[in-house]
Image (tube, rainbow, N blue to C red):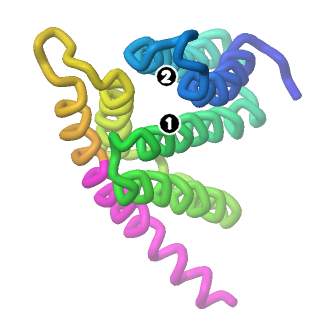
Amino acid sequence: MPINIPILLTWLRIILIPLLIAVYYLPEPWLRVGERDLAATLIFVVAAATDWLDGYLARRWQQTSAFGAFLDPVADKLMVAATLIVLVQLGRLDAILAAIIIGREITISALREWMARIGAHRSVAVSMIGKIKTTAQMIAIPLLLYYRPLLGVSAFELGTWLIYIAAVLTLWSMGYYMRMAWPHLIDEDRRR
């Protein structure tokens, strides 16, 4: 396993997952509710920043590796899934929205793995709709964690709107990826 700064940043993102969850289990005297929300928001934002930073540094310093390419999306999906589950538990997110987003991530990850195995991974490369979905999701989640008004705007309401947009884009992008992979799936079935 290669060790470099980008991979260490990815590991940091994974380590932050139990920390974000633990914030909500600390006793009341240690952190009040608003402080918990702020701490969880900051942890998530730091994790999201490491996601951008590790990719940037790996490309800039030419430290890309097969292990890093594997670990980075795993860390991203674990962080998002864990945080969505926390938000469901807090009553700030409908379970159906969390299931849509997590289910899509599992489906597309499996599809990408299968497409790579048959040599057609470029057919399911990240699309613009996927990037927009990720952006909406990565803005919505900290707003839902923060929960309180922010600069006179309800962070919860804005986060709720954005997570609904992310859920719609999640379904749309999943349909897009499935449509791109479909000819390869049919062709592979015919060969068997």
Residue drawn where x is 72% and y is 30% of the image:
68
Identity of the amino acid at label 1? Thr
**Magenta segment includes 185:** yes
The quadrant in which the N terminus is found is top right
The quadrant in which the C terminus is found is bottom right
**Magenta segment includes 12:** no
Q: Which residues are the magenta region?
A: 167-192
The image position of residue 4, as x and y in percent, is: 78, 14
Can you identify the residue that label 1 sits on? 83
Describe residue 14's horizontal placement relative to residue 149 as left or right. right
Identity of the amino acid at label 2? Phe
Numbered label attached to residue 44: 2
Q: Are marks 2 and 1 in contact (CB under 8 Å)?
A: yes
Question: Closer to the camera, 30 or 190?
Answer: 30
For the residues labelled 2 and 1, the Cα–Cα distance comes to 8 Å
Q: Residue furthest front?
A: 29
- Quarter of the image for residue 118 reads bottom right
Residue drawn where x is 36% and y is 43% of the image:
91
The image position of residue 173, as x and y in percent, is: 34, 55
The image position of residue 157, as x and y in percent, is: 18, 33
